Amino acid sequence: MSDYLRKGFLLGLGAAVSGKEKFEQKVKELVEKNELTQEQARTVLDNFMEKGSTKKDEWDEKSREKKKELARESGLATTDDIDELRARIIVLEDKLGVSLAEEADTEEDQN
């Protein structure tokens, strides 16, 4: 499934680059025809780039969520799952008054 996501991302990236180039060319033509000023053209391009950045951020977030979903479906632990378990272990160690890390160090020193 990750190959499918990668191919989709690359397809979207290619379309975005091609679209950006065509868009910039159209804006340039409008400036040459005096239908847009340089300042208007810059504003239009900045808005276009900002929207592209926003869409990229949305894609990244959706991609992260999809990966987490696939990991859960596959029975794999996510980083969040591991961090949560570590926090729970620390709480339990504190309640018991022991530290598994300290015990491991003590055992290594004895060997």
Image (spheres, rainbow, N blue to C red):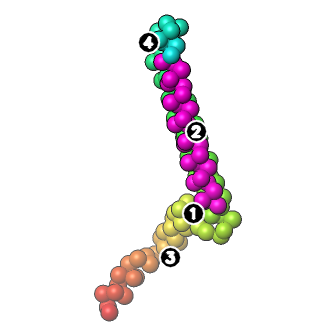
The magenta-colored residue range is 1-28
Q: Is residue 53 above or below residue 110?
A: above
Q: Quadrant of residue 51?
A: top right
Please name the amino acid that badge 4 sits on: Gln
Q: Main secondary structure of the magenta part?
A: helix
- Between label 1 and label 4, give the one nearer the viewer: 4
Residue 77 visible in the displayed image: yes
Residue position for label 3: 96
Q: Secondary structure at mark 2?
A: helix
Residue hosting label 4: 38
Residue 15 image label: 2
**Circle nearer the N terminus (3, 4):** 4
Q: Residues within 10 Å of mark 2 (few under 14, many from 20)?
A: few
Residue 6 location (% of width, % of height): 57, 54
Picture disc at residue 13: none
Can residue 2 be found in the magenta stretch?
A: yes
Query: Where residue 10 sits: x, y (%)?
Result: 56, 48
Kindly tell me whether residue 91 is visible in this rendering: no
Q: Amino acid at mark 2?
A: Ala
Task: Measure how far apart labels 1 and 4 are at the Cα level.
Answer: 49 Å
Q: CA distance from mark 1 to mark 3?
A: 27 Å
- Residue lying at 50% horizontally and 76% vertically, measured from the top left: 96
Residue that protrudes farthest toward the right in the picture: 73
